[in-house]
Image (cartoon, rainbow, N blue to C red):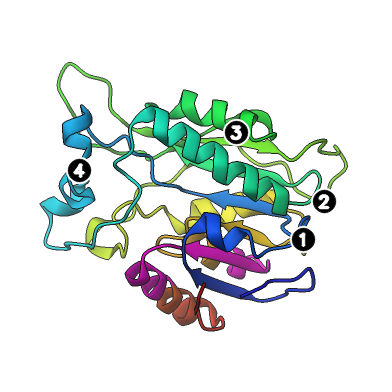
Amino acid sequence: MRIDHNFTGTTIIQGDTLRVLKAFPDDLFGGVITDPPYASGAADQNAKQKSTAAKYSSAKTNNLLPDFEGDSKDQRSWTHWAAEWLAEVRRCAKEGAPICVFIDWRQLPSLTDALQWAGWIWRGTLVWDKTNSRPQRGRFRQQAEFVVWGSNGHMPSDRKAPVLPGVFRQSMPAMTKRIHQTEKPLQVMRDMVRIVEPGGIVLDPFAGAGTTVLAAKLEGYPAVGIELSPHYAAAALNRVETEGNVPQAVAA
């Protein structure tokens, strides 16, 4: 499938991000909002090789969700991989387009390196305050995740976007209501997509549960999501269709 500059809809494409992106023309997307696999949900490399269900809390509930790929890389491999897709995404992005990428504290330095290696201007780090987390006596709560943000070159100060917060406070979706193991809150994504100027196409290269695509649709933006897993691509499509009435997903 090829998306051109006149695209005005919303869609989910099932396929590998690096392969799918090559079908897009230069200077297409008005902004990138995404939540890639962190590959950090383990204490050591042996634990990293476990299934994502074993590493994340969905394994501890009755809502056992399918695993997702890309979460077992070591830090060096993850950083090179991130730089590669970030460079390809930048080629597809308009001059001045913003990018926002979710990450945790372990991979934060690797992501800021990869973002800059790919040619983006790193402009700061946002905080998602999850407001709750599992308490551990004698420890600080693991209450926050982060969003590294930047732009594809110069970002004019008079661009048509509002002043947005640097901290987003929203609790995690209840595990029993998620369709993806690491699903982000819809309201956070609805707030965040507003960094993209009106009419700009929003890209999510790792669509997961389709939250970014749905948020963009609800906020009035055209959007494209790419998802490797056939299961999650179908689940994301069903969610966005149910709540946003979008076209069918297609295989890359």
Q: Do the numbered discs 1 and 2 sit on residues whose CB atoms are within 8 Å?
A: yes
In the rendered image, residue 133 lying in the magenta stretch gets the answer no
* Label 3, label 1: how far apart the Cα atoms are: 24 Å
Density class for disc 3 (Cα within 10 Å; few <14, some 14-19, many ≥20) is: many
Q: Residue visible at 68% across and 52% down?
A: 31
Disc ID at residue 55: 4
* Quadrant of the image containing the N terminus: bottom right
**Which residue lies under the disc numbered 3?**
115
Location of residue 49 in the rendering, given as x and y in whole percent from the top left corner: 20, 41
**Which residue lies under the disc numbered 2?**
160
Density class for disc 2 (Cα within 10 Å; few <14, some 14-19, many ≥20) is: few
Location of residue 11 in the rendering, given as x and y in whole percent from the top left corner: 57, 74
Q: Please, what is the three-letter code of the amino acid marked with disc 2? A: Lys
Which secondary structure lies at badge 4?
A: helix
* Precedes in sequence: disc 1 or disc 2: 2
* Precedes in sequence: disc 1 or disc 4: 4
Task: Look at discs 3 and 1 and give the one toward the viewer.
Answer: 3
Q: Which residues are the magenta region?
A: 215-236
Report the side of 129 relative to 99 (left or right). Answer: left
Q: Residue visible at 66% across and 76% down?
A: 9
Q: Is residue 104 visible?
A: no
* Precedes in sequence: disc 4 or disc 2: 4
Location of residue 58 in the rendering, given as x and y in whole percent from the top left corner: 19, 53
Which secondary structure lies at badge 2?
A: loop
**Which residue lies under the disc numbered 1?**
198
* Label 3, label 4: how far apart the Cα atoms are: 26 Å
